[in-house]
Structure formats: structure tokens, C-alpha cells
Image (cartoon, rainbow, N blue to C red):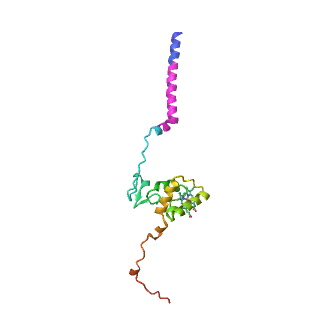
Amino acid sequence: MRPAYDTLRAMLTTINFVAGVLFCCLFWLLAGDAVTEMLRPRPVMEQKAYRPGTGGGGEPEEKVTNGIHDATGLIFAEGFEAVRGNCTACHSAKLITQNRATAAGWTEIIRWMQATQNLHDLGENEEIIVKYLATNYAPEDVGRRAGLDVESIEWYLLELE
Ligand code: HEC
């Protein structure tokens, strides 16, 4: 009976081995991505300097031209990340860049969206966001276009008839 027992044992060992390999394969199939993700080195978030024309990160969606963030059209200044992170999910940033308001006005717009449009509580980001908006999209900006040079205008009489 001894040889048969040895054979059985050898078979069991083989089956054990194969089962082990299969288990490993199955585990890798099911959890491989999670493990790879866990082991992947995390990119370190670095503080980006807000300098016109430099952009950050070097990726296309991070490109900044003349102080304007290309992808969103938002002014690339302090607080930009908070605004992009909280204000561009529901609508285009155009709604922001087309508007001008004081800090109080922007807070009012935010309250309105919170009351009627399901905007989430901005927490401590609200201060950063309102400061960014009031600084970069202030009412005075409307008059940024150079004033008319009245002296240089050649006036003429409009002849009717
Ligand atoms: C939960 C979705 C949501 C988020 C997030 C959101 N908004 Fe809005 N917002 C809206 C909706 C909806 C409108 C109305 C759009 C329309 O009228 O077409 C709107 C309109 C606006 C308007 C135009 C208001 C007007 O009077 O015409 C501005 C400006 C604005 N949002 C700025 C912001 C800012 C700044 C943030 C970030 C703090 C933000 N939004 C985040 C949903 C959102």
C-alpha cells in the first residue's frame, strides 16, 4: 500500500501547488489593480507659483497663457484651485468670468446657488473662493478698458437729410 500512498501524497502536493498558483492568479486578477494602485508612488502636490505665462504641472489642461488658465478661462491667481475644484462641476467657468461682483455680491450668488441649485457647503474654501472672485472679478474690472481719449477724437456733425 505504501507506493499508492506515496503517489496519493505526490498528487495531493501537486494539487495543492496548482491550487496555490490558481489562487494567486485569481487574487491578482481580482485585486491586482488595487495592489498596483497601493504601491504606486503618489505624486507630491507642490505649491505652484502664480506667475503669468508659466502655468503649472506642464500638462495641457494646466496651461496658462498671459495669466489666464487655458482650459477654464479663469484668471490664474491665488485661490484658483479652490474655484476650479468647487465651481466648475455644474457649469462652465464662463458663468464666473462673465460676472463681476463685490465680495458681498459673490457671497450672495453662492447663497443663491446653495438655496436653489444644490451647491454644496463650501466650508473653509468659501473664504478663499470669495476672496479670489472679489479680487479678480471685481465690479471695477468693467472699466479696465482704456478710457476714450477725447482730445484725439475728430468730431464731426452728423448731417441729417
Ligand atoms: C451644484 C451645482 C453648481 C455648482 C457646484 C456651482 N454652481 Fe454656479 N450655478 C449653478 C446653476 C444651476 C446656475 C444657473 C445656471 C443658468 O442659469 O444657466 C448657476 C449660476 C451661476 C452664476 C450666474 C448667476 C447669475 O446671476 O446669472 C454664477 C456667477 C455662478 N453660478 C458662479 C458659481 C461659483 C463662483 C461657484 C463656486 C463657488 C459655482 N457657481 C458653483 C449651479 C452650480
Q: For residue 107, what is the image quadrant? A: bottom right
| Residue 11: x %, y % from top left | 51, 19
At 51% from the left edge and 16% from the top edge, which residue is drawn? Answer: 9
- Residue that lies at the very extreme toward the bottom in this rendered image: 161
| Residue 138: x %, y % from top left | 48, 65
At 45% from the left edge and 37% from the top edge, which residue is drawn? Answer: 39
Q: Which image quarter is the N terminus in?
A: top right
Residue nearer the viewer, 101 or 7: 101
| Quarter of the image where ligand 1 sits | bottom right
Check residue 42 for magenta coloring: no
**Numbered circles on residues, count:** 0
At 50% from the left edge and 25% from the top edge, which residue is drawn? Answer: 18
Q: In this view, does 26 lie above or below 77?
A: above
Q: Is residue 110 above or below residue 43?
A: below
At 46% from the left edge and 71% from the top edge, which residue is drawn? Answer: 143
- Residue that lies at the very extreme toward the top in this rendered image: 1
Check residue 28 for magenta coloring: yes
| Residue 22: x %, y % from top left | 51, 29
Residues drawn in magenta: 11-35
Q: Is residue 30 visible?
A: yes
Residue nearer the viewer, 1 or 139: 139
Query: What's the magenta bit mostly, secondary-structure-wise?
Result: helix
Q: Is residue 88 visible?
A: no
| Residue 115: x %, y % from top left | 61, 58
